[in-house]
């Protein structure tokens, strides 16, 4: 009897683990090739097309080019960077968040690129340095010194509209939820404006 219960418990655990694995958010980056009611069909740079159903209150943010002059004290930014020997972070990409996004993903952690970091924080100070603009950014529990050189990409999020999600638009969904039927669901979409291709 004990073995039966133990076997059942293992089976239940496997089902739960499997369900949790299926629910792990995935990234979808590519070009919209179709719109079908509440869903968009996305052709990724690699792989098969993905059908993504958008929630009723999906948040759409445009991604636009920005400049160093837009990175001001008080701005909430996300910086993908490489750690330097002196403890600073050399920026690869800087994203300036829209005000309504303040606090999104706040903190310092590994980034998707090998060896790189991601810091989402508020700009405290900014001064010109030998290697570029030097920022001190603060987040709950810490701070970082960021160096933005001339080779860093600087972008900004702006509040967008669902009408921007049409065929030909380049989009990035950071956390789409897999559904039992194999489709995906998303509550936020970033869409490139002009020649910007979000990633």
Image (cartoon, helix red, strand yellow):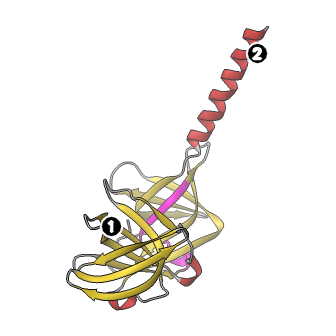
Q: Residues within 10 Å of mark 2 (few under 14, many from 20)?
A: few
| Residue located 41% across and 64% down the image | 118
Residue 103 lies left or right of residue 83; in this view the side is right
- Residue 103 lies in quadrant: bottom right
Q: Which residues are magenta?
A: 161-176
On the image, the x and y values in percent for residue 163 come to 54, 77
Magenta segment includes 73: no
Dot 1 lies on which element? strand
Quadrant where the N terminus lies?
top right
| Residue located 45% across and 82% down the image | 123
Of 2 and 32, the residue lying toward us: 2
Residue of label 2:
5
Residue 103 visible in this rendered orientation of the protein: yes
On the image, the x and y values in percent for residue 140 come to 55, 70
Q: Is residue 173 above or below residue 178?
A: below
On the image, the x and y values in percent for residue 101 come to 56, 77
């Amino acid at each position: 009897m004990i073995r039966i219960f133990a076997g059942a418990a293992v089976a239940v655990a496997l089902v739960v683990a499997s369900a949790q694995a299926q629910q792990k958010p995935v990234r979808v980056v590519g070009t919209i090739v179709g719109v079908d009611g509440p869903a968009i069909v996305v052709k990724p740079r690699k792989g098969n097309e993905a059908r993504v159903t958008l929630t009723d209150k999906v948040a759409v943010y445009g991604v636009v080019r920005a400049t160093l002059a837009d990175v001001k004290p008080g701005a909430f930014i996300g910086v993908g960077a490489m750690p330097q020997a002196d403890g600073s972070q050399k920026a690869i990409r800087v994203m300036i968040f829209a005000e309504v996004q303040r606090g999104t993903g706040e903190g310092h952690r590994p980034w998707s690129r090998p060896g790189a970091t991601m810091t989402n924080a508020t700009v405290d100070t900014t001064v010109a340095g030998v290697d570029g603009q030097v920022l001190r950014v603060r987040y709950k529990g810490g701070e970082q010194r960021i160096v933005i050189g001339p080779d860093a990409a600087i972008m900004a999020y702006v509040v967008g509209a669902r009408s921007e999600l049409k065929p030909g638009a380049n989009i990035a969904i950071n956390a789409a939820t897999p559904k039992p039927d194999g489709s995906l669901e998303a509550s936020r979409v970033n869409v490139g404006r002009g020649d910007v291709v979000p990633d």
